[in-house]
Image: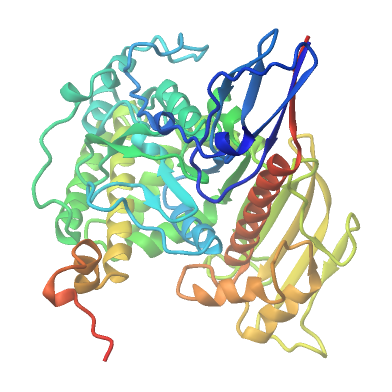
Amino acid sequence: MATALANVSLSATRVAARPDSGKNPAPLASPFVKSPWRRAQRGWGMHVRARMSASSSPQSLSDQIAESVKKAEETCAGDAESGECAAAWDEVEEVSAAASHLKDKLKNSDPLETYCKDNPETNECRTYED
Amino acid sequence: MAVSTVYTTHSLNSSCSISSPTRTQLGSHQRQVVFYRSSSCRGRSSRGRSVSVITCSTDTVVIGLAADSGCGKSTFMRRLTSVFGGAAEPPKGGNPDSNTLISDMTTVICLDDYHSLDRYGRKEKGVTALDPRANNFDLMYEQVKALKEGKAVDKPIYNHVTGLLDPPELIQPPKILVIEGLHPMFDARVRELLDFSIYLDISNEVKFAWKIQRDMAERGHSLESIKASIEARKPDFDAFIDPQKQYADAVIEVLPTQLIPDDNEGKVLRVKLVMKEGVKHFSPVYLFDEGSTISWIPCGRKLTCSYPGIKFAYGPDSYFSHEVSVLEMDGQFDRLDELIYVESHLSNLSTKFYGEVTQQMLKHADFPGSNNGTGLFQTIVGLKIRDLYEQIVASKAAVPVEATKA
């Protein structure tokens, strides 16, 4: 009996757990559960805006950095202690980090290698043993 | 009374098996032996004569890595995944801006994906990403818990380029799940799920120096803008990020050197590895004599070092009223023989062969910090996590789980 059982595999254990499946456990104590922001993630659809096109290039990120620094300086000119000022400088940090990560990514990648990883069967990605 | 003894064996793939209700004719004193292909199974025997409910899960070990933005989380992740072998890549064919990295053994997810407010929402409300109100800890907890239990999840993607939340990606439960970001130890429920946690504690001076290195070449930035950004984020950093270090099992502290008087270039670093005592499956690294206090300058007759030299310290200490061991390195390695010499004098490194630390450091000589304590201690923590994982898997495999019910 034991050996027979060992071969029974249960594929249903990999069911995707959607966070909004309705049978979520009751929210456990968290000081922010009641905040109005929580509503935002309950439905994916309404939260996803159209992606800006062609935005993932170092050049466009450099532009974004310059723009966000300018905006942060403007925002903080009125009140350097405000949440808006902190949020504006936080955006500068976020965009600067993204630019740095993107540069690392591009530095370590060869365009042909990247293409062939996704398309190993194409002619330009064939390798010959002899 | 029914007694069911469940023997578990570990298997390399993480599929799960189950036994459907079984019946035997052995009467009231029966003993059933069920073999599983996966560990951490729980068998519940019902009164009478059958094993009726078996729940199974995979062996997902969860590691938390906390640090501020721009403090070396990505480099640490690359070193960690390298210890486990195989390159970590973004999910194939998925969103090119996905923050996830997948290798054979590990999946690294970025907790920014649990932002509840995108960049525009934060701007509107005047909150930073460091603020818990910009993050959805309920969803973070539910999904990390599900992955730990061996269930796949549809995880959102925060797009760092656009600042928007992209459609979710499917994440399968890995053998080792690393959650890295600003808040892995902020929420008590998420903290409970962590098998091991690390905090990268970068001093203000070094943080400033690193951000100058990173950003000065950007035409939008100046010394003033770099300084202003650090200062504007500091109140939220101090309130929400920094306090997490008290929960970490290992803290890597990065400070300015003491070898050069009044150095503020941030090129030579003093790095401390604070290791909590009494953590299950984790025994701290030590220098010469476990538990003693030691100051060591390896540069002398046997090893010549260039200026400003290398200095080590080791000893017991207290950290947020926890008993800890602290290993400290000030200075940097200029030559390979210095690194090997140091490795050979450290104990309890959890290496699989002599020179493995040196080999790992050399393999990634181009990563930042490969010639100083940040690279050395990140590599050591990586080896410790591999050891922890292997111990957890072995302990689940070795001990038969006995489920008894009267």
| Residue A3 left/right relative to A129 | right
Q: Nearer the viewer, residue B179 or A89?
A: B179
Indicate the quadrant containing the N terminus of chain A: top left, top right, bottom left or bottom right.
top right
* Number of numbered markers: 0
Q: Residue at x 47, y 44 (%)?
A: B174
Q: Residue at x 69, y 43 (%)?
A: B397
Indicate the quadrant containing the C terminus of chain A: top left, top right, bottom left or bottom right.
bottom left
| Residue A113 left/right relative to B269 | left
Residue B174 visible from this viewpoint: yes
Q: Determine the image quadrant of residue B229.
A: top left
Q: Determine the image quadrant of residue B190.
A: top right
- The image position of residue A71, as x and y in percent, is 20, 41
- The image position of residue B81, as x and y in percent, is 50, 58
Q: Residue at x 66, y 11 (%)?
A: B46
Color style of the picture: rainbow
Which residue is situated farthest in the front direction here? B25
- Relative to B63, residue A98 above or below: below
Residue B332 visible from this viewpoint: no
- The image position of residue B261, as x and y in percent, is 66, 69
Q: Nearer the viewer, residue B33 or A89?
A: B33
- The image position of residue B237, as x and y in percent, is 48, 36
Q: Determine the image quadrant of residue B272.
A: bottom right
| Residue B9 left/right relative to A117 | right
- Relative to B169, residue A42 above or below: above
- Relative to B209, residue B192 above or below: above
